Amino acid sequence: MIQDKGYLLNLLSVFEEATFGIAFIDPEGNWKKGNSNFLHFTGCSEEDFSGFTWDDVFEKNESNTGFSSLITAASSRFSPVVLKVLRKDGRRVWLNVFLLRLENKHLACIAEDISREMIFKELDQLERNVLEKNALPYYRLEEVLDEFIRGLEQIFPETVCSIMKVSDGKVYCWSAKGLPEDYLREIEGASIGPKAGSCGTAAFFKTAVIVEDISTDYRWEPYKSTIISHGYKACWSTPILSASGKVLATFAIYYKKVKSPESQELNFINRSGKILAIILENYLSIQSLKQSNQRFQYVTEATSEAIWDADLRKGTVVWSQGYQTLFGHPYQQEEMDGSSWSDYIHPDDYAGVTGSIERIIDSRKKTWTQAYRFRKADGSYLRVEDKGLVVRDPEGKPLRMVGAMRDISTQYAYNSSLKELNRSLEASKKHLEATNAELEQYAFIASHHLQEPLRMVIGFMDKLYKSYGSELDDKASRYVLFALNGAIQMRQQILDLQEYGAIGKNETNAQFRWLETSQLVTDALRVNSEFIQQTSAIIEFGNLPRIWGDKRTLIQVFEHLILNGIKYQPPSQKARIVISSQKKDGETVIYVQDNGLGIDKAYHEKIFLLFQRLHGKDAFPGTGIGLSLCKKIIEHHGGTIWLESEVGKGSTFYFTIPEKVD
Ligand code: ADP
């Protein structure tokens, strides 16, 4: 027995001052005495402690099935055991406990607080579990988040955690099993902002918001009554940001006491935020992958093309449904041997197709296009156009080729028939050109050859009339005059025809110039001034544009239109001609208007044909070529000519000359 009082006092101070928790317990498991550290670790007061048993302090679990089983199991020596304590203040403490038998059958319990290490160990385990689950395709995001929150709440029993999704500036509950339902309903869809509770504010400012006392914090003003009514007093929230800095969610911890975080807790919030960012980023990338896969699926179903994805290293290919639809070959979703493509290329096209692919792969080029024949399941060949894209690694090494084959048989047949048509058109054109040249030659020769005998006929008839007119009786004189007029008319017709044939003969616009239309009119009037004066016709012109064209032929147009206007008048009526321009359908239209006889609508097109005349030669002399010539000239300029007229109300001839194209 130790008798020395001093020694005992020393022992007592060692007991009190020890960094370990030390407590004594009797053989039945009743606590006898504990040093202040032991009381602090277990969160008990001295009074509680005296009435408590072992099982009141340590949580039962697999490694602690109760005091009696612990005593029975240990033979002579106890091994250290990790035990959990849930303190009155809600904190969980892990103790490394070592038991020592004393002489009076009592036991000494020596405990070391290992909570810090254990919290991190458990957190580590929890994080590993949720990340593993997150990587597996069959877990929903909500399940993973729930598991994470549940695990955290078990490690930190005094907390309730929540994860809120942030979308379009609003918060929605993702996981918050421990929070009261009426509060969750209240904040569902709430807008983020500078005064939107801890989460809404954290999302708004993209920074952690630590509210130690909800009741006095201005940021909680709109929501505090409900959450306070459930006893919550503090809420710390941190935003979860994507790699690009977008707020995906908020992670919050609620306490039922006013509380500011210790550095270890800030660490933990930070760490949880990072894990959640990984989980959410992963989820979002899977979502977008799913979406693009689905999009691809829809596209492959919607299009009639056979889409293919070839792995150049493995020599395999994956086809879309179109492979079967287009060619009738059996379709499978999995990879197929690359020969499922090359075997069906037409033997005559094989070398060209495979060679062109090899060249593209060897080069740095990205795209490949080839048209060839591809065998169908029934043995026939389909003309296809195949387009591919080479996917390379950063060093430029080819990895994959993705592309689509399209049936171009109809287009091919159409193109072939078009080529055939073009060939026959070309042949007809050549034939026509030859015939035209022949005709022109013929017309030229005929008109030249006719001029000579005509000149003779006119000359001799004239002589006959002048020399022997007095000897001929009236009837014979009239006959001679008829013959003379006929020959003169014929000469005019031949001259007009020659003019007509000359228009556009050497298809060239080289003599085109900018022309003042008023000048063209003036020139036309000057040439015919004698006739105009004789008839006392009134000619008015103005508001005429500058046009791009051939001076000589355009003067001819004005001459014909003006002279016709003067010529085709009722007897004793003075002609009144107006030449001007107006806008019609956005185009400048030049017109020549007269107050003459007018033309029945039935002849509005006919009069532009060669030799078409509506009036007799005796009443109104003419060759029937003037308007055809005008039409040819205007069309040679790329314009159109038409008229508006009514019998007895005069006529207006319109024509357009297109703008100059540079
Ligand atoms: P030509 O005047 O030499 O007969 P055109 O080709 O100039 O030949 O005219 C064809 C026909 O159109 C004329 O014969 C005439 O009957 C009719 N015509 C042409 N211009 C007018 C007009 N301004 N008013 C009435 N009839 C016209």
Image (tube, helix red, strand yellow):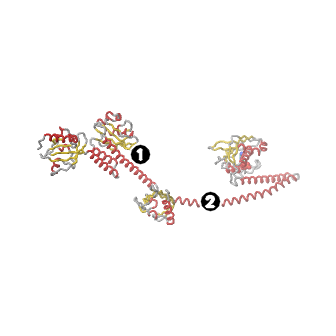
529 relative position to 97: left or right: right
Near mark 2 (Cα within 10 A), the count class, few <14, some 14-19 or many ≥20, is few
* Mark pair 2, 1: CA separation: 63 Å
Q: Is residue 376 above or below residue 589?
A: below
What's the residue at 11%, 44% (across, down)? 1
Residue 229 picture location, percent across and down:
29, 35
Which one is in front, 345 or 121? 121
Which one is in front, 139 or 327? 139
What secondary structure is found at the residue carrying circle 1? loop
Identified by mark 1, the residue type is Ser
Q: Residue furthest right?
A: 471
What's the residue at 40%, 44% (across, down)? 246
- Quadrant of the rendered image containing residue 516: top right
Q: Which residue is mark 1?
A: 244
Residue 650 picture location, percent across and down:
70, 43
Q: Which residue is mark 2?
A: 425
What secondary structure is found at the residue carrying circle 2? helix
Residue 192 picture location, percent across and down:
38, 38
Near mark 1 (Cα within 10 A), the count class, few <14, some 14-19 or many ≥20, is few
Residue 49 bears which disc, if any? none
Which one is in front, 226 or 81? 81
> Is residue 185 something that shows in the picture?
yes
Asked if disc 2 is less than 8 Å from ligand 1, the answer is no
Q: Is residue 566 above or below residue 217?
A: below
What's the residue at 64%, 42% (across, down)? 583
- Quadrant of the rendered image containing residue 235: top left
- Along the polypeptide, which appears first: circle 2 or circle 1? 1
> Is residue 648 something that shows in the picture?
no
Identified by mark 2, the residue type is Leu
Closer mark to the observer between disc 2 and disc 1:
1
